[in-house]
């Protein structure tokens, strides 16, 4: 039986995410309890706000070890928006902060230096594309049917993976390639909000929840 857990550390978009999962027919638990996280079949790490504050709250609640131990079990973890960024090694948002280190790479600010018309934060719907524009894509949460579809983004920073193949898909924001989905083994992340992306986002959540 699937046990979908949404980690509550005070920085997540919990209500809309929970409702999206319920709409898909999945019961979910919102918790910061380490034992309940470890007993889950699927864990989602949401996130809204600033990196430093979020990782600080995770450490205050002693959730870092819980998250790392959960991923070592091989069960799937999904980070959403800031939650995806927290999976990275470090972030340069208002200083330098150590992330969870589950995806090697760093989180940097979207730059408007090359194009003054770029608005920050990046807010709105963008189509996602596979790495190198490959028509075939083999990923458990982003399948071929999602490529070229639009998803809802709202962020000022984005992640750059150290190894290129950890980046599954990207979107274009003016002349900047924004990492949209990352994956390393059982660890997944999406910069967009699937719970706010209509049918396309629900498909991503369903794909994640169906991972065995």
Image (cartoon, rainbow, N blue to C red):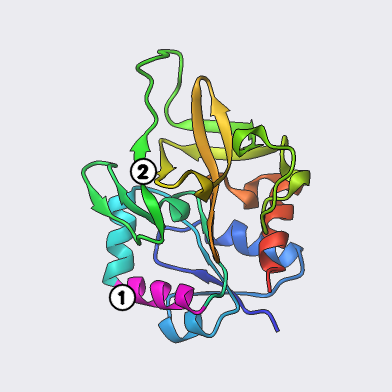
Dominant secondary structure of the residues highlighted in magenta in the image: helix
| In the foreground, 212 or 49 | 212
Q: Where is residue 2 in the image (x, y as percent from the top left)?
A: 68, 79
Q: Where is residue 95 in the image (x, y as percent from the top left)?
A: 21, 43
Q: Of the numbered discs in the image, which one, if any, rests on residue 62?
A: 1
Q: Position of residue 51 (x, y in %)?
A: 33, 50
Q: Of the numbered discs in the image, which one, if any, rests on residue 102?
A: none
Say which label, 2 or 1, has the lower sequence index.
1
Q: Residue at x 71, y 60 (%)?
A: 207
Q: Determine the secondary structure under disc 2.
A: strand
Q: Where is residue 204 in the image (x, y as percent from the top left)?
A: 69, 54
Q: Determine the secondary structure under disc 1.
A: loop
53 to the left or right of 117: left
In the image, residue 132 lies in the stretch drawn in magenta:
no
Q: Give the range drawn in magenta.
A: 61-73
Circle 1 residues within 10 Å: few <14, some 14–19, many ≥20: some
Q: Residue at x 34, y 75 (%)?
A: 65
Residue identified by numbered label 2? 107
172 to the left or right of 200: left
Vertical comparison of 159 with 72: above or below: above
Label 2 and label 1: CA atoms lie apart by 23 Å
Q: Which residue is drawn at 70% across and 84% down?
A: 1
Q: Which residue is drawn at 31% across and 59% down?
A: 55
| In the foreground, 129 or 26 | 129
Circle 2 residues within 10 Å: few <14, some 14–19, many ≥20: many
| In the foreground, 58 or 78 | 78
**On the rendered image, what quadrant is the C terminus found in?**
bottom right
Give yes or no for contact between labels 2 and 1 (Cβ–Cβ under 8 Å).
no
Q: How many marks?
A: 2
Q: Nearer the viewer, mark 2 or mark 1?
A: 2
């Amino acid at each position: 039986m699937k046990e979908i857990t949404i980690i509550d550390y005070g920085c997540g978009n919990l209500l809309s995410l929970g409702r999206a999962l319920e709409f898909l027919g999945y019961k979910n638990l919102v918790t910061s309890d380490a034992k309940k996280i470890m007993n889950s079949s699927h864990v989602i790490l949401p996130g809204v706000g600033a990196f430093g504050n979020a990782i600080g709250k995770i450490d205050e609640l002693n959730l870092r070890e819980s998250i790392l131990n959960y991923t070592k079990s091989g069960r799937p973890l999904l980070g959403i928006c800031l939650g995806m960024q927290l999976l990275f090694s470090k972030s340069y948002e208002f200083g330098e902060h150590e992330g969870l280190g589950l995806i090697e790479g760093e989180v940097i600010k979207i730059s408007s230096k090359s194009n003054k018309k770029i608005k920050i934060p990046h807010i709105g719907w963008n189509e996602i594309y596979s790495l190198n524009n490959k028509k075939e894509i083999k990923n458990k949460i982003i399948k071929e049917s999602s490529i070229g579809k639009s998803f809802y983004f709202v962020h000022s920073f984005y992640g750059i993976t150290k190894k290129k193949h950890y980046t599954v898909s990207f979107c274009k924001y003016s002349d900047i390639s924004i990492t949209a989905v990352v994956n390393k083994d059982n660890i997944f992340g999406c910069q967009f909000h699937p719970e706010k992306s209509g049918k396309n986002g629900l498909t991503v959540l369903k794909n994640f929840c169906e991972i065995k």
